[in-house]
Image: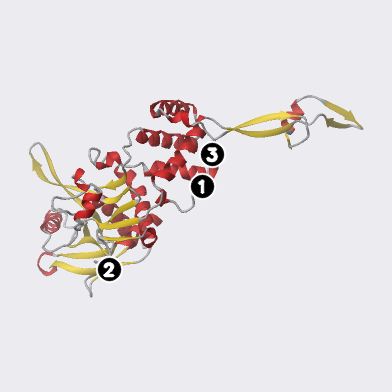
Amino acid sequence: MKVKIVHILQEGTLVNAEIIQRFDLRADEKLISPEGLSLFVGFIFRNNELLFSFPKHFFQFGLYNITTTYSEVEEDIKLVSKLLIKQHQNFKGYNTNSSDTNNIPLKAFYDILNYYRRYGLYHVETRQYTTDYSGRVSWKKTIHSKKHIVSNYNIIYLPLIIEKKEAMFMFVTECMAYAIEKIYSIIPFYFDNKSSINYKYNKNSFEDYKSVIKKLKRCYSTEFKDINRILINSLIIFFTWLSKWDNKTKFVINYFNLIWENMVNNYLSTNFAGINKEENSLLFSKNNCKFSFTSKLELAIGEYHKGMRLIEIDHYFYKDNIAYVFDSKYYNNLNELDYKQVAYCYFVLNNNNNNEINRIYGALILPTCFDDITYVHLDRLRIDNFIIFEHYINTRKAIQFSLDI
């Protein structure tokens, strides 16, 4: 089964009514808004047609909400998919009662395939010892056999014990072979080089997935090698999903805003180099690593009932009497003053008990499909000692950076 047609969407943009109907997007309120806007990043695959929704500002206007061939967008799809696989585990369970519960377990898919490409099919290596002189001599076994001849003051050990290693295939092997073939049939568009499986297994063994899962759990409990435990656990995840699969193949998320925030914090901590005061812009230098931003810094703003009311700053750094108060904004557009960021700057200044902070640089970090650029959002330096920038990072570049670290 191959992909014949690809429909390209972009989160936050209007979806064609025909596409909404064809992929039954109204069946899940997490996929489409009442106004018809895409609310997700990820894909839905049915009837040889692929619907892929990219993050906001991935494409320039006119390059989304189109129908094309898979080869035209293959690299883009794989780029975003790798990011989703890498980041999905960080937010596992974030929206457990949404469409996420029906997602294919991509991480488990890749763990199974990567194991196969690196080690081959799962097997247990057994050792047999013979005296047929065809193979590798086991000197330890030979010496301990106590069979030797003394000749001219030399000890000759006879017969030599030969060690032979054989791979013993097991139930886990059958599960692995079955899973790989099934994965290729479920998402054929994801893999460049499909590894052929030259292993015959009894398909009747997989008529009852619940029974398969029980057996795999027993295998897991007796396996002590970490890499094998990861494989078996991935197989358990795969068959658990397969037992509930309704033949709708999809992997969609509704929390790319959190992924963007995580990406931004890594990017800032690695590449941020300060402020260009003459041009009022943010400076970046590859692998600068001089600003280690704290993610999700919580600050108390006074008593709130019995506890303390907190504010949460996405990215915070303090150095040389200057506070950097940055906020990730996964927006389509920013058309008005961000009052929350203004309030955060005033709060940090007003709670500066030891007068250690004499200036604040605030910034809203947003995605763009164009080159990186900085604008001044609000300048209160001469009055209140703070300025807020809008800095736009190219979405593709941010994704590639997150994959490379």
* Label 3 with label 2: CB-CB less than 8 Å: no
**Residue 370: mark:** 2
Q: Label 1: state its secondary structure.
A: loop
Q: Position of residue 231 (x, y in %)?
A: 46, 37
Q: Is residue 39 visible?
A: no
Q: In the rendered view, tell whether residue 170 sits above or below residue 101.
A: above
Residue closest to the far right: 152
Quarter where residue 282 is shown = bottom left
Q: CA distance from mark 3 to mark 2?
A: 45 Å
Q: In the rendered view, tell whether residue 224 sits above or below residue 309.
A: above
What residue type is disc 1 on? Ser
* Residue marked by disc 1: 195
* Residue marked by disc 3: 121
Tell which of 105 and 377 is nearer to you.
105
Say few, some or many: other residues with alpha carbon within 10 Å of mark 1 (under 14 / 14 to 19 / 20 or more).
Answer: some
Q: CA distance from mark 1 to mark 2?
A: 38 Å
Q: CA distance from mark 3 to mark 1?
A: 11 Å
Say few, some or many: other residues with alpha carbon within 10 Å of mark 3 (under 14 / 14 to 19 / 20 or more).
Answer: many
Residue drawn at x 29%, y 58% as measured from the top left: 8
Disc with the residue nearer the chain's start (1 vs 2): 1
What residue type is disc 2 on? Phe
Left/right placement of residue 286 relative to residue 322 reads: right
Q: In the rendered view, tell whether residue 173 sits above or below residue 368.
A: above
